[in-house]
Image: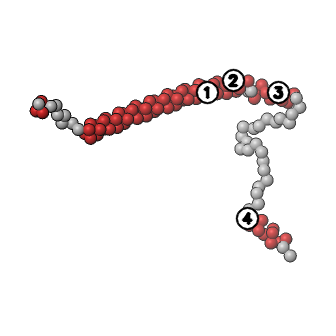
Amino acid sequence: MKNNRYRNSIGLPVLTAVLILCGAGLLAALSVVVNKNRITALAEQQRQVEQEMKLLNFEIVSLERKVDLLLDGARVQPILQAKGTWLQKLSPDARAIIHLKPIPTAKTVAQSTEAELP
């Protein structure tokens, strides 16, 4: 009767190693899927932000056009002059609006400090 006995050639250590390898493979596949889903979600968020930026830029451009139409110099200048401001017309040939005194050079400053010393 001992000859009819079933003998399994796969032992417990081999079965344990196979289960551990399968579990590790499943975990690796799961981590790849999770990372791809996270990257896809981030890309979708980036697309939404870029779309909002395009809409905001379009709105900014349209508002700038509206402001340019409303604040045309020919329309605003008479209003400000009527209110008594010190507004003066700017010549298109002017290179600067505000004229500043020239800054003294380092030699001039050094000479003036030496002259003041006793």
What's the CA distance linking mark 2 and mark 4?
49 Å
| Mark 4 or mark 1: whose residue is earlier in sequence | 1
Q: Nearer the viewer, mark 2 or mark 3?
A: 2
Q: In which quarter of the image is the C terminus?
A: bottom right
**Relative to 70, does residue 21 appear above or below in the rendering?**
below
Q: Residues within 10 Å of mark 3 (few under 14, many from 20)?
A: few
Q: Nearer the viewer, mark 3 or mark 4?
A: 4
What's the CA distance linking mark 4 and mark 1?
49 Å
Residue 61, quarter of the rendered image: top right
Q: Which of marks 1 and 3 is in front?
A: 1
What's the CA distance linking mark 2 and mark 3?
20 Å
Badge number at residue 78: 3
Q: How crowded is mark 1: few (under 14 residues within 10 Å), some or many (20 or more)?
A: few
Badge number at residue 66: 2
Circle 1 sits on which residue? 56
Q: Mark 2–mark 4 contact, CB under 8 Å?
A: no
